[in-house]
Amino acid sequence: DIQMTQSPSSLSASVGDTISFTCRASESINTYLNWYQQKPGKAPQLLMYGGSSLENGIPSRFSGRGSGTDFTLTITGLQPEDFATYYCQQSDSMPWTFGQGTRVEIK
Amino acid sequence: EVQLLESGGGLIQPGGSLRLSCAASGFTFKFYAMSWVRQAPGKGLEWVSTVSSGGGVTYYVDSVKGRFNISRDNAKNTLYVQMNGLRDEDTAIYYCARRGSHDGFDIWGQGTLVSVSS
């Protein structure tokens, strides 16, 4: 199975900050990498697919890059509604697997 | 409005069975592969199972193989998972999710809680 490792597990930031966090796959997944945002008590929401493509309706302050094993999600100009947990997920091969999440907290 | 609505969760004893349902609306259900994803209390997301758009191909995470059975009724726009031999570690919120045309899970239900406990 492909293991997905996210870092850091949590980070503190302020509104307006630019933050980045990473997702590493245990083997190459090309660009079959999706990012999700989950707020407490809510279902996850797809932010990005294919490593760098923005899902419809997602603000352009979210961006992603990477291929192979290393991927990054960046939020430029953090907004209050962005404080949440972010998960990466590989869809290269079964079983599809998620990272353990990065929690973004208010500083 | 595109929507998925799960039902069927509850408290069940270890070894018991439960069937979850997910009613879809607002999109052409038969065109999309559908999945179940679960989240144990305070934990991360775990993909559980996927069924192809026509229902003929299914996939499972190893931990549920032989115990869970995913199915769908495209005439009723409904996804199911039959869960047998439930274990404590199956306790989780179970989400149904649509695999979008761009490969990610683009639509999620609100989730239904399954608690396995004696």
Image (spheres, coloured by chain):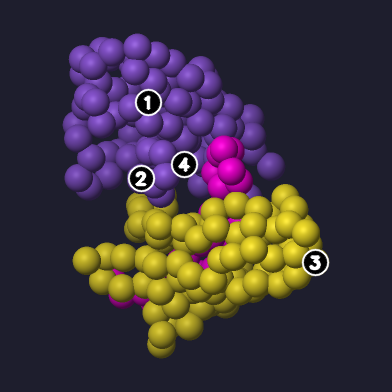
Chain colours: A purple, B yellow
Q: Is residue B71 depicted above or below A105 in this figure?
A: below
**At which x and y percent is residue A5?**
58, 27
Going from the N terminus, do you reach mark 1 or mark 4 first? 4
Per the image, the residue denoted by label 4 is A32
Per the image, the residue denoted by label 2 is A46
Residue B67, quarter of picture: bottom right
Marks 3 & 2 on one chain:
no
Per the image, the residue denoted by label 3 is B15
Whether label 1 touches label 4, CB < 8 Å: no
State which mark lies toward you, 3 or 2: 3
Give the quadrant of the C terminus of chain A. Answer: top left
Image point 64% across, 38% down: which residue?
A2
Separation (CA) of disc 1 from disc 3: 41 Å
State which mark lies toward you, 2 or 4: 2
Query: Viewer-proximal residue, A105 or B107?
Result: A105
Image point 42% across, 32% down: which residue?
A86
Going from the N terminus, do you reach mark 2 or mark 4 first? 4
Which amino acid type is marked by label 3? Gly
- In the drawing, does residue B44 fall left or right of residue A44? right
Image point 50% across, 73% down: which residue?
B21
**At which x and y percent is residue A43?**
41, 49
Which amino acid type is marked by label 2? Leu
Q: Residues within 10 Å of mark 4 (few under 14, many from 20)?
A: many
Helix, strand or loop for disc 3: loop
Q: Residues within 10 Å of mark 1 (few under 14, many from 20)?
A: many
Per the image, the residue denoted by label 1 is A73
